[in-house]
Image (spheres, rainbow, N blue to C red):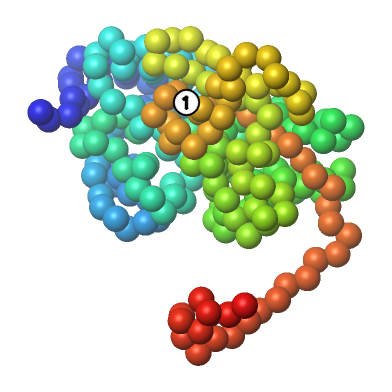
Amino acid sequence: MTAPELGEAALAALREAFGESLSTAGAVLDAHGRDESGLEFARPGAVLFARGEADVVEVLTLAREFAFPVVPFAAGSSLEGQLIPPPGALSLDLSGLTGIVEICPAGFLAVVEPGVTYPQLNRALRPHGLFFPVDPGAEATLGGMASTNASGTAAVRYGTTRENVLALRVALADGRVLNLGSRARKSSAGYDLRHLFLGAEGTLGVITQLTVRLWPLPAHRAALRGAFPDVTAAADAP
């Protein structure tokens, strides 16, 4: 069975709802048909540049009505291919949702939109002596990092994205927006749905806001570089 695609009726409804925020330009489609993995390429049928949570909810409502697939997209820095859409799908670009809603130094947390990159957040946090420690090595967005449970070189000390996201707002395909988790560091109430969406790669819903955990900037940093003649020697090193 072939995957459903954006038909003319769906495109017309999207154009009426979103105007110039919807693009079918060839260069835009090409940019949203691949990630950094080089695994494959598949053009979406159109790209929608979301301007806020209301746009996300509305496009999911139209997707349900016209039965077309939606693939969330932001920085496109993934190496795993999950951003590559089924041919003819709608690529939902969240890179414009770059608001840092709140920085709470006393609570060691920040509330951000999903298009905020972690370097952007860390630049805003530096005057407060805080930082977000997860560093996947690319200019990744926090929404994408949460969707893939991104890790990095500091994960042994600070944990992966999963351990550093306290709460989420998620738009579901049925039009509901869920608030998952809380600012409390410890809670035993209810199902742990927050962790269900962390690492789900956009298959369960679209993240529209995150509350992330912050850490004090380290007083000192040190780097160690080891040279090995080949991969076997590196793997055998104690």
Q: Is residue 69 above or below residue 135?
A: above
Going 52% across and 13% down the picture, which residue do you hit? 177
Q: Could you tell me if residue 99 is visible in this image?
A: no
Going 66% across and 79% down the picture, which residue do you hit? 225
Q: Nearer the viewer, residue 131 or 125?
A: 131
Outermost residue, left side: 1
Label 1: how many residues lie within 10 Å, few (<14), some (14-19) or many (20+)? many
Question: The N terminus is located in which quarter?
Answer: top left
Q: Could you tell me if residue 33 is visible in this image?
A: yes
Query: x and y percent of residue 238 in the render?
Result: 62, 77
Query: x and y percent of residue 181 in the render?
Result: 65, 22
Q: Is residue 32 above or below residue 205?
A: below
Q: Nearer the viewer, residue 141 or 226?
A: 226
Query: x and y percent of residue 29 in the render?
Result: 30, 41
Residue under label 1, please give it: 206
Query: x and y percent of residue 187 in the render?
Result: 73, 21
Rendering quarter of residue 72: top left
Q: Is residue 173 above or below residue 214?
A: above
Rendering quarter of residue 179: top right
Rendering quarter of residue 70: top left
Going 83% across and 52% down the picture, which residue do you hit? 217
Q: Nearer the viewer, residue 237 or 7?
A: 237
Q: Is residue 180 above or below residue 214?
A: above
Amino acid residing under circle 1? Val
Q: Is label 1 in a helix, a strand or a loop?
A: strand
Outermost residue, bottom side: 229
State how many labels appear: 1
Going 68% across and 29% down the picture, which residue do you hit? 166
